[in-house]
Amino acid sequence: MAEAGTVSREEEGVAPEKLLRGISEEVALEILEEMLLYRRFEEKAEEAYAIGMIGGFCHLHIGQEGVAAGCIKPLRTEDYILTSYRDHTQAIAKGVDPKAVMAELFGRADGCSGGKGGSMHMFDPAVGFMGGHGIVGGQVPLAAGMGFAAKYRGEERVTVCFMGDAAVNQGSFHETLNMSAVWGLPVLYVVENNEYGMGTAFRRVSTTEIKDRACAYGIESSTVNGQDVLETYNHCSKLVDEIRAGGGPRYLEVRTYRFKGHSMSDPVSGTYRSREEVESRRDEEDPIHILRDRLFQVGALTQEDLEEMDARVRAVVDEAYAFAEESPIPSPQALYKNVWAEINEHGRLFFDRRPEAPAPGETPATPGDGEGD
Ligand SMILES: Cc1ncc(C[n+]2csc(CCOP(=O)(O)OP(=O)(O)O)c2C)c(N)n1
Ligand SMILES: [Mg+2]
């Protein structure tokens, strides 16, 4: 872990007692350790991808860790979150075991989705983590459904729905916001504005601001700096309390920036954004560095403490990696679990042409086997 840099420009002139934004040193240190874990976890995933241990898509959240830590920490276990495909850190933040997240990335049986979802489809209903969704904006109406269910049953549960900036141009977003307002649903819609949807800058596809998108539906809207995790945490705590108290939906734009490419196959810079832009944002707006420097400044953290913290999170990541490597690949039988399959007119599962799922150990039919329908 690098030594502390100079205090960012943003911090000049801020009184030391205000640097932690009213948050206790203990909680601020916890948040730093959480963000450091997310960073180290994803750096390891990046390495694993490069050597072929992870296949398919893989979208990193590096640079955006303040959003995961700041928005999810105020939640209870029974609260739900839904998010897009950039979901590893958010899964861990909600309480999914890092070992199960790494195993899922590796496509292994002990992954949180049984190895069948991969990077984009982390799930763990036991801790309220309801995915991991690959269709831009696809999770937005699902979140309203969860909010509706909670309200209908009279539960105190809050649902937080994360989405990228590109999702606000989807029809599903607008229909959902409208119905959420009409029904007063207990949902916090969080737009992670990292300024780009793949290679398209948001300013090229919108003449209005993200925060203004909720006005048409009468939903209270606000903006927070996601690189300042303490500000994000304070603000989200307030919004979650308001929603839990029956205040109806809220909409939040979190301003952030991704330091890596859109996915593992996308260059960091050089096509739709310049190297200078990425480097300057990374140097000045790293949420981990910003919090680290504040903790140094108030005397709550020393270089030695930081190194110990880093060693602790690296140990968690190494353990997750070893666990994922040892976990078996899913059995062919697992293909039949959690699959929605209709019975055809012959009384058989239409995708297999057999009367029922094969017995354990029996090989499933390959497409084209058996009689034709
Ligand atoms: C409906 C739909 N259209 C297009 C895509 C292809 N696609 C995948 S990610 C992405 C960009 C999304 O950007 P944003 O919502 O800002 O999230 P970010 O990647 O920045 O986190 C697009 C267009 C998709 N997955 N779903
Ligand atoms: Mg984006």
Image: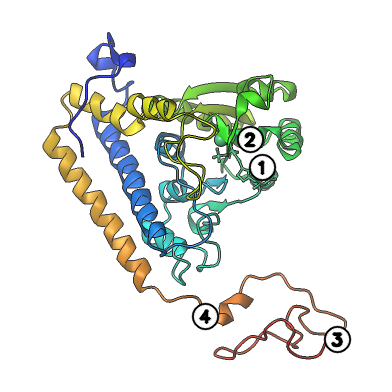
Q: Is mark 2 within 8 Å of ligand 1?
A: yes
Q: Secondary structure at mark 3?
A: loop
Badge number at residue 166:
2
> From the Cβ of disc 1, is ligand 1 less than 8 Å away?
yes
Compared to residue 370, the image places residue 260 above or below, namely above
Query: Tag 3: residue type?
Result: His
Dot in front, 3 or 2: 2
* Residue 37: x %, y % from top left: 32, 46
Question: Mark 1, residues whose alpha carbon is within 10 Å: few (<14), some, or many (≥20)?
Answer: many
> Mark 3 and 2 residues: CB-CB less than 8 Å, in contact?
no
Query: What's the CA distance linking mark 3 and mark 1?
Result: 38 Å
Q: How far across and down, in percent of the image, does residue 63 sit? A: 40, 36
Q: Which residue is mark 3?
A: 346
- Is residue 12 visible from the viewing direction of this image? yes
Q: Earlier in the sequence, mark 4 or mark 3?
A: 4
Comes first in the chain, label 3 or label 1 = 1
In the image, taking residue 75 as reference, residue 21 lies left or right, namely left
